[in-house]
Amino acid sequence: MHTVTFSEATLEAMREEMRRDATVFLMGEDIAKQGGIFGQFKGLPEEFGVERVRDTPISEAALVGAGVGAALTGCRPVVDMHFADFITCSMDELVNQAAKLRAMFGEQCVVPMTLRAPDGITKSAGAQHSQSLESWFVHTPGLEVVVPADPEDAKGLLKAAIRSDNPTLYFEHKALFPVKGPVPDDDDFVVPIGKAKPMRDGTDVTIVTYGITVTRALEAAALLEAEGIEVAVLNLRTLWPLDYDAIADAAARTHRIVVAHEAVRVGGVGAEIAAFLGEQCFDDLDGPVVRLGAAHVPVPFAPALQEAMYPKTPAIADAARRLARREL
Amino acid sequence: MHTVTFSEATLEAMREEMRRDATVFLMGEDIAKQGGIFGQFKGLPEEFGVERVRDTPISEAALVGAGVGAALTGCRPVVDMHFADFITCSMDELVNQAAKLRAMFGEQCVVPMTLRAPDGITKSAGAQHSQSLESWFVHTPGLEVVVPADPEDAKGLLKAAIRSDNPTLYFEHKALFPVKGPVPDDDDFVVPIGKAKPMRDGTDVTIVTYGITVTRALEAAALLEAEGIEVAVLNLRTLWPLDYDAIADAAARTHRIVVAHEAVRVGGVGAEIAAFLGEQCFDDLDGPVVRLGAAHVPVPFAPALQEAMYPKTPAIADAARRLARREL
Amino acid sequence: MATTLSSSAGPAGAERGLGLLRTMVRIRVLEEGIEKHFLAGDIPGFAHLSIGQEAVAAGTCANLRRDDAIASTHRGHGHTLAKGTTMRAMVAELFARTTGVCKGKGGSMHIADFSVGMLGANGVVAGGFGLVAGAALSAVLRKTDQVAVCFFGDGATNRGPFHENLNLCAIWNLPAIFVLENNRYASTTSTAETMKITDVARRADGYGMPSAIVDGFDAFAVFDALETAVARARSGGGPTFVECKTYRARGHYIGDPERYRRKTEVEDVMSTSDPIVRMQAVLSDELSPQQFEHLWAEARDEFADAVAFARNSPSPEQSEAFFGVYAGDRDPGDPVHRIAARERDALLPFAPSVGTGSQGSGH
Amino acid sequence: MATTLSSSAGPAGAERGLGLLRTMVRIRVLEEGIEKHFLAGDIPGFAHLSIGQEAVAAGTCANLRRDDAIASTHRGHGHTLAKGTTMRAMVAELFARTTGVCKGKGGSMHIADFSVGMLGANGVVAGGFGLVAGAALSAVLRKTDQVAVCFFGDGATNRGPFHENLNLCAIWNLPAIFVLENNRYASTTSTAETMKITDVARRADGYGMPSAIVDGFDAFAVFDALETAVARARSGGGPTFVECKTYRARGHYIGDPERYRRKTEVEDVMSTSDPIVRMQAVLSDELSPQQFEHLWAEARDEFADAVAFARNSPSPEQSEAFFGVYAGDRDPGDPVHRIAARERDALLPFAPSVGTGSQGSGH
Ligand SMILES: Cc1ncc(C[n+]2csc(CCOP(=O)(O)OP(=O)(O)O)c2C)c(N)n1
Ligand SMILES: Cc1ncc(C[n+]2csc(CCOP(=O)(O)OP(=O)(O)O)c2C)c(N)n1
Ligand SMILES: [Mg+2]
Ligand SMILES: [Mg+2]
């Protein structure tokens, strides 16, 4: 194990995979010259050259489209979306091409493309630079969706995404980049796509979550431990294919579930999880599945407003506490 | 009341609203010269002229973008997306502009734009012409989403969408266009956005659904009636704002709920409904909320495959039957 | 872009002409057959014919190697056949059979054949630009001398991806070739309504990309323009834009009422410009009427054989609907397989049995 | 596009010059102030300065009526001020106060002022093209003689919406004007890397749209080009493309390390081209140094007043976060209000109290 920031963990993943496989390349806007907005590309052009680490024009549709074309013809492109919000500018390429080609073409091809998409709410970036859009893509057959919660996930999931033969969306929360944590030393360490990770055990409630909200859930669990409430935290890591077995297992063990994320609550991934629990684990549940997510509003600019409209540690702790105390 | 096809009902709505309000106009690809793929624009250019019924280049991003611009400056544009699948080509304009501008700009403006989007599975149109994408937009704050189930809905919801000061997505199932049904004669008949419509009562189970699946649910209910099972059917009509009260009411009355739609089941609108029920109506539920939706695959071309991967009357009837018989 | 010596000259030219003619005749026979079988209900979905435009497919693909890539459009039968896909694999696909090149999952609008570098027809207008830019980029990164060709219509040139990808190919000097089939219409809408310019090739100037405008009814002219463009791309000289002036002699889709143009317009164009008639005229000194007839007969036999093959092929098992999406989904150990199997188990019991006949109709 | 008589000539020209200079000075003072307050932590979010580019905003907006529309970019302070928004309303917005023109919900990247036809800065590069096409279409449909102007950068011209909307405006002959601020960079990336052409105006040819290329440091030159373009648009003559050659004298955002260019490059350009210095030189026969100084002092006072106004204004109530999205959401009878109120009730009890200071930093 060694300790690195989330940003460095992604860099390690890129470096190792680019060394390992000459068909891996990276393209995006403003990634080469200053190392990326979050330092997440530092040193890559120096090591791999500007042929394999490409600054591009502002042409998101072309980047993803060309990513698909390169993936169809023997390369493993990693396309940086700059901000996840701009996936909207290449939605057709992602949804109608990347996701569908293998199925439509009768399995003649694979589309081993990775899309890196810095997302989430931070620093009053405003409505057009703060979204968490993963739910759309869980609903889109043909795509894989992964969301790292810490440096270990960041490295292991990025490597897994690059090695995957499926088009994979990798959502990395902007506020996580400077966060430090341990990462295994093994060059072949990958986090398997499709498997959730229990972050802590507990008998009273499980908080099912992913991405930056894992940290908030762990904080909430620590708060409640002081109150004598034992809270388990499940880090989903992958949103598609979703680890339904691990979720069902949590229901079987704690019978009470909170699902939390920073994305909009309505229609969020939490809805899929809660719906699954209500359908497949009905008899295991001793109380309602409580969903927490951002309010159904574009993220406001003013810091006071921004901080009011999505769930952080206190809201998560409150839900878990009330569920544990049978107040819900 | 008079009887018209779904397609004619939309035509009546367009005609009445265009006569009533000179700022209403329509644009889209190939709408004027042949009356639209489903005859849904027939006669409009003749009555309102090609200034207000505009054939456009194949430029979806510009159409929606210009729709937003026109809506911001005093018009009520109706933009036809040709096939709902091509919303992906104007996703940024819809999600990052139309949906957000009012909120970001501190309520200085309204965006009274209607997007018409023929959607759904029919006639082996294949993966890129068969999607039902409404779930994405329920998850997108700032948009309204309506889905007519029959000619009455078609007319009343389209008029409501055009009159609404919010950007509204109007999903019209391609297979519904030729379907006939009664429509009120009143020129000012509108279906209120945000209110569901009970289509039939029943005491054993409620099928909560919308769009073309309402017909399938009604067929299922008729089948089960013969078996002595009383099935209520709730037609949501609007998906955002969702009529949570009507859904809660159904749970309070029948305690057993099936949610069905043609969109992909995973992460579909059914997940939101089931999650809501599990959270807010936990004590009212006597059994799991059963969700039906399309399989998590791009819609295949071969008729035999296409017909296998989404729920029609038999699957819906089976779920309701088993729920009513306490087999679930 | 001028070619000094036309490829139509001399005996080599005659042989080339024969090859081009054979391809055009095969496309014509295939598409007339598709039309017939579509109307008879054998072919589900949508189908768009390229009758009148065969010279573009033939003249272009005659310059390509099997390992070069093409991306096509909703109107892709000609490109696919010209690139080397067999009629059997195509017709079986259109008939939605397991022996189809996409196992019946694609159909006319999504036909693809990776064994010959055909990256797919595309149901999204302008969907091919990105695929070609990427295939060309991939060729550079993998250090091969492959080239990638994008076929597209005039209508597609009004979409954003046209702009973004042509610029990308230009600045990166990629081995991509953009072959515009300007057939005067996008569905019901004429180019005069959708652009102020008459030569779309002018748009290439805005990317600093060289361009050529050719008579798209003349397979030799297309061949020559592509020969230059392919040579440039293969030798590292970057992309080229080739505008082929052509005409769609059939409706936009099979069943199109064609109210946007007069019948006589079609007759006028085809009476003087039919690319097959023109090529036969050019070759009439070298080939006898019997030889021409032989070409047609061969093509008709090939088509009849393909139809028989398709008819004798099975429709896919309905359980196939749930697999073949993710790379791992046939592997019982893969998480995505388990999810797919559960979906199959939930829906398959209710699947209506569907005959092999068509549910199709025009769109 | 040539203007026969420069608008800089004669006494009328001097008065015009003074007006343009005043606007440019106000923009400069505003942006230098924003820079200071951003670094001091008073302004959250991102902020992008247009220092060096003031002549474009000034020369363009001097031709516009209050009821004409503009759409701006992430670099929109100059456009907004030049179109008529008060410094108070702008600074209060940047400080995230209720008295801001967007009630503190927009900030620098999403500032808008519908009372003066300013349809918004935009956090999406190329987000303005559609808005302007639509505003221009709306003017035609509502039978007014309003025009709509789109400001955008060189980087934005590589995005699809540029292509689609310019073509749309051209074919429909809409009263739209496209004002390109070619400042040589898109963030870290120079135009030489993202396009093969040096004059982006060539792209306008591909839409059959007339264009002009002007010295974007010369407010008179911009004014003249826009005068012609606005007259054309207002009289039904259709759209015009105006490329202003200019330069961004600051980093892409406040805090940009600017490793992609040398400090001396900026100094070189600004030492000869600063649009304010140049205008002062042009006007030096007509105006005394004291008169120039007076302009600056006035602008500084205006800015100081705006900062005081902003500081004395309240931050929004946190419950405001849940409303103002849908037209009906403040109406207790509206379905969407009830949903919003429930969300407020669920989340507001846990909202951390946040000071009025900045959480901001460069991006
Ligand atoms: C993005 C998108 N918009 C609209 C359509 C519907 N559509 C299919 S083909 C077509 C016309 C295409 O015209 P052109 O590019 O000239 O090709 P042609 O049909 O003439 O071969 C249209 C509008 C589509 N398939 N994709
Ligand atoms: C669609 C989109 N892609 C990327 C970005 C990130 N971004 C913000 S400004 C910018 C550069 C814009 O360059 P240009 O259009 O030349 O305007 P300038 O900054 O020079 O004024 C980029 C890449 C964005 N905001 N939107
Ligand atoms: Mg065409
Ligand atoms: Mg720039």
Image: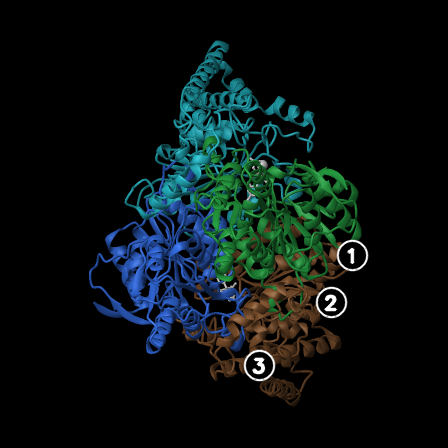
Chain colours: A blue, B green, C cyan, D brown
Residue C22 placement (x, y as % from top left) = 45, 20
The label on residue D67 is 2
What's the residue type where badge 3 is placed? Ser
* SS at circle 1: loop
| Mark 1 lies on residue | D143
Residue C104 placement (x, y as % from top left) = 43, 31
| Mark 3 lies on residue | D315
User: Are callouts 2 and 3 both on one chain?
Assistant: yes
**Chain name for mark 1:** D
Q: Is residue C107 above or below residue D243?
A: above
Q: Is residue B27 above or below residue A251?
A: above
Q: Earlier in the sequence, mark 2 or mark 1?
A: 2
**Chain name for mark 3:** D
* SS at circle 2: loop
Q: Earlier in the sequence, mark 1 or mark 3?
A: 1
* SS at circle 3: loop
Residues at discs 2 and 1 in contact (Cβ within 8 Å): no
- Viewer-closest of C277 and B221: B221
* Separation (CA) of disc 1 from disc 3: 41 Å
User: Are callouts 2 and 1 both on one chain?
Assistant: yes
